[in-house]
Image (spheres, rainbow, N blue to C red):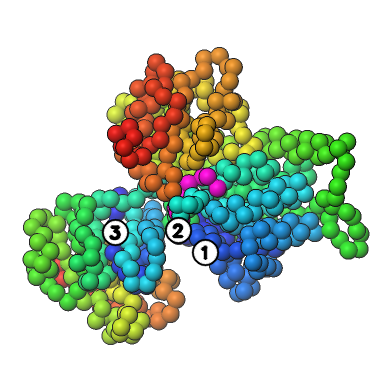
Amino acid sequence: MIEIRFHGRGGQGAVVASTILAEASFLEGKEVSAFPFFGVERRGAPVTAYTRIADTKIRNKSGIYAPDYVIVMDPSLLDAVNIAEGLKPGGLILVNTKKSPIQLRKDLGLEDDRKLATVPATDIAIKHRLGSSAAPIVNSSVLGAFAKASGVVGIESLIQSVKKNVPIKIEENAAAAREAYDSVVIH
Amino acid sequence: MKMVMTGNYASAYGAKVCRAEVISAYPITPQTSVVEKIASLVSSGEMKAQFVNVESEHSAMAALISASMTGARTYTATSSHGLLLMHELLIWAAGARTPIVMSNICRANGPPWSVWADHHDAMAQRDTGWMQVFCEGNQEVLDSIIMSYKLAERPDIRLPSMINEDAFILSHTVEPVDVPDMELVDEFLPSYNPRFKLDVDEPYGFGSLVMPDMYMEFRYKINEAMEAARQGWRDVEKDFEKTFGRNHGGLVEFYNCEDADAVLLIMGSVASTAKDVVDKLCSEGKKVGMARLRVYRPFPVEEIRKLAGMTNIIGICDHSYTFGHWGPMAQEVRGALYGIADQPVMKNYIIGLGGKDMTPEILEKIFLKTLALKDGADQEIEWIGVKGLGGW
């Protein structure tokens, strides 16, 4: 079983991202579940969402406390929440940031075998006109980067799921996912 | 077709494939996406139904009672305080023998305010005359709607049915769900044609005053129907399996209970997590099982007695509490087992109120505590996870 935690801000699409990822894996024949943690939802507040992917039926309905992967959709969350909390040894954190993974590792003080990946998803989303430049919708870009950095899901299934789940700008979202797939940096 | 969807969308699709004709609902967290989805299915023409907007849950139920009395198939969904506001009309719906089907997204009651799961809202409706089903997954949420109409509309039953779905844990969690073809559902579930209905061309009076010489007779008949529904659920599930190729375990699902040293009895989605824990403990050589009470009304007395024959210790895990005396399931189980030979050791656990997460680790601790009760329960009741109590 693979467990993934998403950190986003209300309105950024973290909950939708957790579903898109689940459905992409479902298209590859996996068993999946995805769920948000609902606090007091409001635009801009920190939000977490989760995805489980497995080969056999997923019966565990409780929360995820020791994820294999963490996805951070907004760089400002690095100061607001402990993004590495519970992350398994050898796990990977993917962050939407312009910084290099090496710089980010220094900033976070992460000195173990857990891997870091970065992608400038905000720039990619703005370039493909997803959301506004003040509030870009980064979920398709972040997921494209995640497909490459994790290898958990193939880019073609991911794009198929993106196309099915985004309400508008379907081709732009698909293109953003592909560009992010090609531009993610892992360390 | 198999799709990835939330429990709330599974509810909406359940109403759709059953061709519910009148929907009336008032939004409340976490039920909202059920009615949003139905509203969008109706407005796009995918679902041929009348969607009646109302100003409260009380009015939603009143609208459905009237619609059901004209012979329409009706559906609504609510949660928590919405269900509590409906209480008066729930009793009316059962008394009027209207086979309304409703999804209740089980959510804690306030204050203190909470939007998360427990069963207190549903348990407070125990005596309304509604059948009550508790689901462990989204497929069961959808399938139970189909089964509910089939049973509720049977001429000798004619009782409303409430399908209980845990807040967020099912309502907002996506899982693969097989949405059956409507043609297959049509085959299983014929249209609803009551013998007596509200009809301007053939007027009858309904629900009027009866004198004391007849009231008790009407109450007796409701109970007669509820008693018949016990076998009814078993039969409907068998038929359902023949048509759709799956079942959800009958009134009580037994998971590894035969010859178990200890069994936890659970309702709702926590039972699903507990199956993983049973497998883990069994692989370590511990003989534990899990029984899932799926149908709460009518109460499955025979299945509970059968469970008592399978194991020596039963830990009864209530997701709610009746202030002043045990959890509701513990009361019913102890009542059902009163006077039988070789009564098992029983202990009541109060779990997961207001969304307190029931992790595999916590469930494992409860299993191990229960296994240790060979010589009798250490206490009648234990609240699990309350700060400062019992080392949690």
Label number found at residue B33: 1
The image's mark for residue B172 is: 2
Query: Quick check: A54 above or below B349?
Result: below
Which residue in the protein does label 3 denote?
Answer: A5
Residue B102 at x, y = what percent? 62, 53
Q: What amino acid does circle 2 point to?
A: His
Q: In this rendering, does residue B71 appear at all?
A: no
Please state the horizontal and vertical placement of residue B103, each as a whole percent of the image.
Answer: 59, 53
Q: Secondary structure at mark 2?
A: loop
Q: State if disc 1 and disc 2 touch (CB < 8 Å).
A: yes
Q: Nearer the viewer, residue A9 or B41?
A: A9
Marks 1/3 same chain: no
Residue stretch rendered in magenta on the structure: B114-121
The residue sitting at 50% across, 60% down in the picture is B29
User: Magenta span has B117?
Assistant: yes
Find the distance from the CA under tag 2 to the CA under tag 1. Answer: 9 Å
